[in-house]
Amino acid sequence: MNMPPETGVRAAAAALVLIFALIPTLGLQEYWIYILTIGFFYAVLASSWSLLVGYVGRISFAHAAMAGLGAYTSAMASTRLGLPLYASIPLAALVVGCVGLFLGRICLKLHGAYLGLTTIAFSEIFRIAVTAEHGFTRGSLGLQAPGFFATNGRAQYYYLFFIFLLCVLGTMWLLLRSRIGLYFAAIREDEDAAASLGVHVVRWKVMAFAISSMIAGLAGAFYAHFVQLVAPSMMSLQEMGLILSMAVIGGFQNIFFAAIGGVFLEVLLELMREIGGWRMTIFGLAVMVVLRYAPNGLVGELIRISYRHVRGWVT
Amino acid sequence: MGLLAFTEQVINGLVIGSFYALTALGLAIIFGVLRIVNFAHGELYMLGAYCYYVLTSVLGIPPLLGVPLAALLLFISGMAIEASIVRPIYEGKVERVDEYAIMITFALAIFLQNAALAIFGPWTLRVDAVFAGRVSIGELIISGDRLAAAGIGVLLIMGVLYVLHRTWVGKAVRAVSQDRATAAVVGIDVARASMIAFGIGSALAGAAGALMGPVFLVYPTMGLIPAIKAYVIIVLGGLGSLWGAILGALILGVVENLATVLIPDTTRALAYKDAYGLGLLILILLIRPQGLFGERTRRS
Amino acid sequence: MSQIAVACVEKRFGGLVALKDVSFTVQAGEMVGLIGPNGSGKTTLLNVLSGFYQPELGEVHYDGRTVNGLEPHQLALAGLTRTFQVTKIFRRLSVLDNLLVPGLTEWTSSRKTAVAEANRILQELGLDHLAGEMASNLSGGQSKLLEFGRVMMLSPKVILLDEPFGGVHPTLKTLMHEVVRGWNAQDITIVLISHDMGSIFDLCKRVLVLHNGALIADGPAEEVRRSPRVVEAYLGTKSVRAV
């Protein structure tokens, strides 16, 4: 192949977007359109998680909880406060963004495993609280939420989530290409050096957490008005494990790889429906293998194999 | 609340605390020697319980043998885990060491939990107790299986501490926990010591699971809460400090039991029961991350 | 008025007193050496000056104002920069990106200017052929040069150098001397920590000596060199050979 890597990848990306845009017109079963829509939801979660982990180097296990918080906030705001969706969803994003800001501020001095433990603790506390306060949230029974559209047309939701995913990816990409992306990378590589060179480490670490959480909360809010039922299981560590699997297997060092991982694994999850509980077992195993032998994720490795001299642009 | 009831609660707390100590000790050893937080520790505990279940309820082995056998199986599994996914860290085969350790043990947890779910189903299982019946000490009544389990637990802890402090293998393991490079220079097989340490840590978790199974029932997600508590304990006691872990475990056991009983709104109190430990964990990590006995590490 | 003024600074770590009653001033444009046996507190002093540590007692003044409590990035943006004893380059970024980080920390700077400046500096340091290379692929000496390049991007007024010549090839060391002299010629204040006595006495007219956290000498290089107190502090270490 004589094309430089960038052109080849851009062409592939454009083709991918085109294919996904045309899928509903190809006469696929409605059910699969529904699954792909859910895949787009997970793609947003996986890529926003990879923003925090791959680009800033902070591992949070509270991501699923953030999505859940967004879902519950929007659901409650639209049902109990009667807010229209174009108000309740941004509200949810704002609320979760603030929670992320708060959590990020608290966890500033924590690193590695300590940060992981603290985020697990917060995630579980949120889930327990949501379940216990069933006066507000209807606990494990689940909270109902209004849908986006008057009718439950699968194609409508498909395009809504597809455009949502593209917007999220586009925004994150612009952010990462800007100097803020450089700050994130510098913080990931060496915080002290970054500080000694003028990077406001505290501000950007907290902002990274807030932005990543806000996107998760936004995705959760969208999800709430898609499936129209929100349950605490959305905030479980099992869900977190799924998001992690998607990001790692796709490639957590690149938001696009992680997004592809999200769609891919959701489809796989459905294809393997018959083997039930073994699905997550296999995913867990796959994550371990990928982490050990293909840290760039499967998508990353695929591209690496196609172009042997990929350099620089991957990270 | 009467003195008798209070004492009963405290003793119950201490009994539970000794189980926590068993799990926490395992985690402390793994952290001390390998310097990684094992996010799959709860699942090793769960694995121990299921091993005990298979040995006693399926294969019909007497419970008293079931516990040490389960611990042995976990010891071997722990070594296998260390050799396959943890060792690469020290052989320079992994780029981002911290991230890798966290994510791969988390993935291991997902794998083990879902494997148990797939094989045994989500239902809670009953397993045979080591000793059934109740024990009366004066006017106090304590369930026999809990007391027996606590007794075995204490014996195991003492056994492990003995091995660590009096045998050559134990000293080698402790040497590695203090300074890997120097231990290697002095001729200790660091790789093997690490493997043994992970094995011991896993065995302790497995023993705790086997002992707790009869008390609290066996189900795939049974490991999450004990794991969180183990984290709380070793952070409270100070990462790397074994005595801190033991002390912290007993404190947590008593505090939890008293808190549940003393708070008036019982349904709420029970629902939030596990949140107390979580809140404590957050508090410690933020205020005094080196715990009660740990060393503070300096940055820069 | 002095550019840097340190007044009665004390720094403790638990029971250990790392710096005790340290006071001195540095004028703009000076090149000062900071020496002392291992553990004497040189790096600690550097960390206090650059905002990484806050002193328990005493004050640090920069450009006439007290800077106790300021964060490292604030000092960096005000022109007070430093390098690290063990190089802290951004390993998984390219050499060029390593330079772009400081080039873009000033919010109003433009990327175009920063890239141009970065390339210019890389050329000056002889690293321009490595611009696209990942920083982890650099040799030890090249990494030290990269750290030099990074602080240069900040258009600094002060550069604190922590053992820049450690384990560096003699040819490279000569180049680094030239670069440092070039900085000083542009009126950049330099504080140089080094165990390499040759470099210290080659570059610095004035030398400060720390011993067990206290400043035991502060004066012209030649005087310090012959001071019996300083020789005694170093007695037993191989550095005595240079004196």
Image (cartoon, coloured by chain):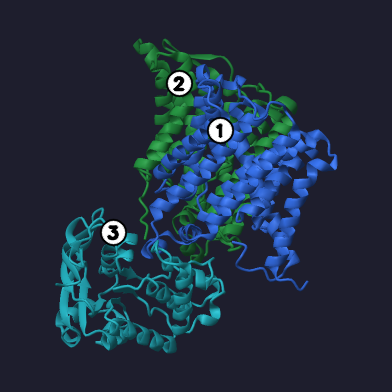
Chain colours: A blue, B green, C cyan
From the top left corner, tell me how far across and down residue A228 is, in percent: 65, 26
B178 lies above or below A113: below
Residue A144, by quadrant, is top right
Say which of marks 1 and 3 sits in front.
Answer: 1
Q: Quadrant of the C terminus of chain A?
A: bottom right
Across and down, in percent, residue B241 comes to 41, 45
Residue with the mark numbered 3: C53
In the picture of the structure, the residue carrying the numbered disc 2 is B12
Separation of marks 1 and 3 at Cα, in angstroms: 48 Å
Q: Quadrant of residue A148?
A: top right
Between marks 1 and 2 in the image, the one whose residue lies nearer the viewer? 1
| Amino acid type of the residue that numbered disc 3 sits on in the rendered structure | Tyr
Q: Are marks 2 and 3 in contact (CB under 8 Å)?
A: no
Residue B198 position, x and y percent, is 57, 48
Q: Which residue is mark 1?
A: A86
Considering the numbered disc 1 on the image, is that residue within a helix, a strand or a loop?
helix
- The chain ID associated with circle 3 is C
Relative placement, left or right, of A156 versus B203 is right
Mark 1 in CB contact with mark 2 (< 8 angstroms): no
Is residue B158 in view from this perspective? no
Checking the image for residue B294, the label placed there is: none
Would you call the spot at circle 3 few (<14 residues within 10 Å), some (14-19), or many (20 or more)? some
Crowding near the residue tagged with mark 2, few <14, some 14–19, many ≥20 C-alpha atoms within 10 Å? many
Three-letter residue code for mark 1: Tyr
Q: Position of residue C133 (x, y in %)?
A: 57, 74
Which chain does tag 2 point to?
Answer: B
User: What residue do we see at 50% from left, 81% from top?
Assistant: C127
Position of C87 with respect to B61 (left or right) is left
Looking at the image, is mark 2 or mark 3 nearer the viewer? 3
Please rate how many residues cluster around mark 1, counting C-alpha atoms within 10 Å: few if below 14, some from 14 to 19, many from 20: few
SS for tag 3? loop
